[in-house]
Amino acid sequence: MGENNWGRWGDEDERGALNLLTPDVVKQASASITTGKVYPLGIPIQSQGVPIMDYRGTPMRLTLQNASDEGIYAAYGCHDGTGAHEDVLVFASHTTSHMDALCHVYGQDKHYNGFSKEAMKTHTGASRLGIEKVGAIAGRAVLLDMVAHMGADKWLEAGTPISGADMAACAEAQGTPVRAGDIVLIRTGYLDMWWSIEADPTAEQPFAQPGINNDGAEWLMAHDVVAVGSDNAAIEVIPFDENDFLTVHKILLVGAGIYMLEFLNFSEMAADGCHEGFMTVSPLNVTGATGSPINPVVIG
């Protein structure tokens, strides 16, 4: 697969670029907080009004119990007028705002660090590289507002590729250099475009999306970033670069062990001109899962 991080942190490593987030790096990242404003980046998990991949199904929130079930608490000495509401949640691990585990994608039959695709089983999930290996992420985040930098009005045109040179120029113009151990956030405006089109019942969502190309992925790997997030479906440009399915995923997840965060909402950060902050990401601790919904937070 060419240059990669396989073996860099040992042949048994399952955390990938997270190894770069040492306590000293995290402590230094706290210096990126300037205003203290909190920006939640997750979009809602709901059945409509948000982008959902058809093959992942419609997320469902089902009521497990409500006020009509008050009698079930009688055995506990429950007083009249007291009760509880509970839900059952049913959705794919990669629903709306989510994080890919390193076992999500493979290339040449191998996952990150050379682990076989056979490590993923139907009933038991991933024995290697599952989302539970992440724990939690905290570090410096840099928002590269490619919409503003590339002179677009509200969003980049569908299918627009973003190269390493594009991101380097944006980072320099913003005065936010990308450093080792950073989380890089890339605003393409795709979510704004999606919501605009969704508001018109006669319009159809395009297949194409703006995103980074192979060169952009290699630039991120060369800068030793820990994770990359975007406001689109796959981080990468669609149609895929070099007509190779999930080619950027293979460079980042498989080759570099760099985590990918998709469908994040940067509208408020961009409106405030916030391009840097302290970010936390905590996936659900599901053993053997290939990904997890997330609601990341950036403190600007």
Image (spheres, rainbow, N blue to C red):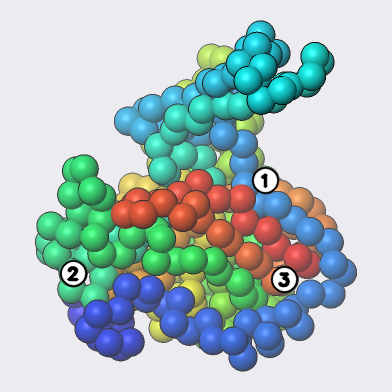
For mark 1, give the secondary structure. Answer: loop
Looking at the rendering, in which quadrant would you find the C terminus? bottom right
Nearer the observer, 38 or 241: 38
Nearer the observer, 186 or 157: 186
Report if residue 146 is visible in the image: no
Is 10 situated above or below 206? below
- Residue 122: x and y, percent? 19, 43
- The number of numbered discs placed on residues in the rendered structure image is 3
Nearer the observer, 279 or 66: 66
Image quadrant assignment for residue 206: top left
Q: For this view, does 236 lie left or right of residue 262?
A: left
Report if residue 82 is visible in the image: yes
Q: CA distance from mark 3 to mark 2?
A: 34 Å
Instruction: Identify the residue at horizontal 79%, vertical 53% (top origin).
Output: 271
- Residue 284: x and y, percent? 49, 52
Q: Are marks 1 and 3 in contact (CB under 8 Å)?
A: no
Is 265 situated above or below 30? above
Foreground tag (1 vs 3): 3
Which residue has dot 3 on it? 277
- Residue 111: x and y, percent? 22, 65
Q: CA distance from mark 1 to mark 3?
A: 23 Å
Residue 154 is marked as 1
Kindly identify the amino acid type of the residue bearing the numbered disc 2. Phe
Q: For this view, does 230 lie left or right of residue 172?
A: left
Instruction: Identify the residue at horizontal 70%, vertical 63% (top origin).
Output: 298
Residue 115 is marked as 2
Image quadrant assignment for residue 278: bottom right
Kindly identify the amino acid type of the residue bearing the numbered disc 1. Lys
Is 185 situated above or below 68? below
- Residue 38: x and y, percent? 79, 59
Foreground tag (2 vs 1): 2
For mark 3, give the secondary structure. Answer: strand
